[in-house]
Amino acid sequence: MYAIFLKEIRSFLGSLIGYIVMGVFLVLSGLFTWFIEGNNVFDLGIAGLPTLFGLAPYMLIFLVSAVTMRSLSEEKRLGTLETLTTRPVSDLGIILGKYGAAVALIAIALLPTLFYAYSIAQLATPIGNIDYGALWGSYFGLILLAASYAAIGLFASSTTDNQIVSLIISMVLSLFFFEVLSLLGDLDWLDKVGKSLEWFSLNFHYESISRGVLDTRDLLYFGGFITLFIAFTKTQFESRKW
Amino acid sequence: MRQPLNLLLLFLQTVSIRVENLAKRYSSQWAVDRISFDIPKGEIVGFLGPNGAGKSTTMKMLTGYIPPTEGKAYMAGLDVEAQSKEVRSITGYLPEHNPLYLDMYIQEYLGFVAHLNGLTQVPKAIAQAMELTQIGSERHKKIGQLSKGYRQRVGLAQALIHSPEILILDEPTSGLDPNQVQEMRQVIKTLGQEKTVLLSTHIMQEVQAMCDRVIIINKGKIVADGGIASLQSQGQNRFTVWVEFSQALSIDDLQGLPHCERVESLGATQFRFHGHSLDLRSAIAERAKTHNWTVLEMRSESSSLEDVFRQLTA
């Protein structure tokens, strides 16, 4: 499992696409947070990063899908799945190794944004006077959200041997679970059903954690969500045996 | 559960691969249809058959990539289904088409594979595998930059990085040029001195050059199983004579010769005669003389494994 984790990290950092995807994420999030007029830090005048944490879920949909799109589909395309699965490693070990690598890579991509948080703390009056609970809560929520996207992405990658198809499936599913489900809660004619469906959206729990309050229900939701998609991935992965 | 295990322990010393009524069904078609064979330790066995005969499917079941629909297989006494992980750690497998990560360096790839096998002395294992397959000179290249021959060796190196007892090689020489084929065969022969090797091919000479024994499979069933010599003798009482005449003849002119079973037309002037005895030659000469045909060339073609193969799998 660890060998697979390391190999995934290496191959991603060794490929140009890895740096492009991370670069695009950082440039866009930096531009929106600091420079583009309307919602940047100076316009808002709030000692926090609402723009970053509002936009990041959407940018992460692309970032995470791009990170996970090749993890299993490429093995399928090359046929290396056969040499991989005939080694003394379990299927779950392969999947978790790849999953862990994807989450680690996204965490690495998010690291530089800590610099924005530091800057905000320096800009606040008096210096350092920001809502740390909300800040760390938001980061924690973002990581959980990214981990959920990664589970979706890995599943998408297990369904096809084509990276682009994998990318599209992953983005559509992620958008559905983050945005579409949560929008259903706003529809009047769905009434209570819509509200219940909204509870199942990633957005609902992401926002809840972002407030800086740790609720076990949110943690259970994310844990369950990730486990479910890992289980889907494993089922799909083992379909060769049917 | 206990009793068959004990039975198997008996076989442990001598039988390396044991296949019992192994079968695989894909939707409605039986790709492998209840085959059985034993391979003793240290033997190089050629698994022969036309494309689509079920060779690869059998190998995939032996290596634990896909489960059998029916039947059992044991590698060194271990059940390939129930003890899959143990089986995989003593088996080296080179799949068909030799899949590799093209953007990895040879050394990096072999290291990855060694770690997957849980080896502790990784650098030593890499060095050994590279020496056996003679890829040391290319070690710092990316796999994608290698020639097909070297890629095939990398494929072999990954299969034997963990010093497996059993090697399963699916068409190890396909797509190589004659020199590379020769080298590959040499490497496999060397490996076969210590390991049990099951290799698949659809090339006869390959089996003659490397194997102690051949198992021929056709449409999922075993049609022949034995030593090379015994298989060749199966075709021993059959002869073919190849003749070229100076003028064009019709095949009807050549029917009804004594000792002749069948005439094959290879063109207007060339024919192949199949029969039971080499007296066939004098019969052909006799017929030519009476009709005043000129025989430009006549030669007998010895029956080879190739003929046996063609007879068995036609």
Image (spheres, coloured by chain):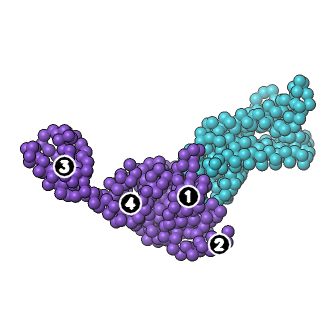
Chain colours: A cyan, B purple
Element class at badge 1: strand
Q: Using the rendered image, report if marks 1 and 3 lie on a common chain.
A: yes
- Front one among A203 and B198: B198
Residue B126 drawn at (x, y percent): 53, 64
Residue A148 drawn at (x, y percent): 77, 44
Q: Name which of mark 1 and mark 3 comes first in the sequence.
A: 1
Residue B252 vertical placement versus B280 (above, below)? above
Q: CA distance from mark 3 to mark 2?
A: 62 Å
Q: Chain of mark 1?
A: B
Element class at badge 3: loop
Q: Name which of mark 3 and mark 2 comes first in the sequence.
A: 2
Asked if labels 2 and 3 touch by Cβ distance under 8 angstroms, the answer is no
Q: Which residue is mark 3?
A: B257
Q: CA distance from mark 1 to mark 3?
A: 46 Å
Any mark on residue B22, and which? Answer: 1
Q: Which residue is mark 4?
A: B207
Q: Quadrant of residue B254?
A: top left
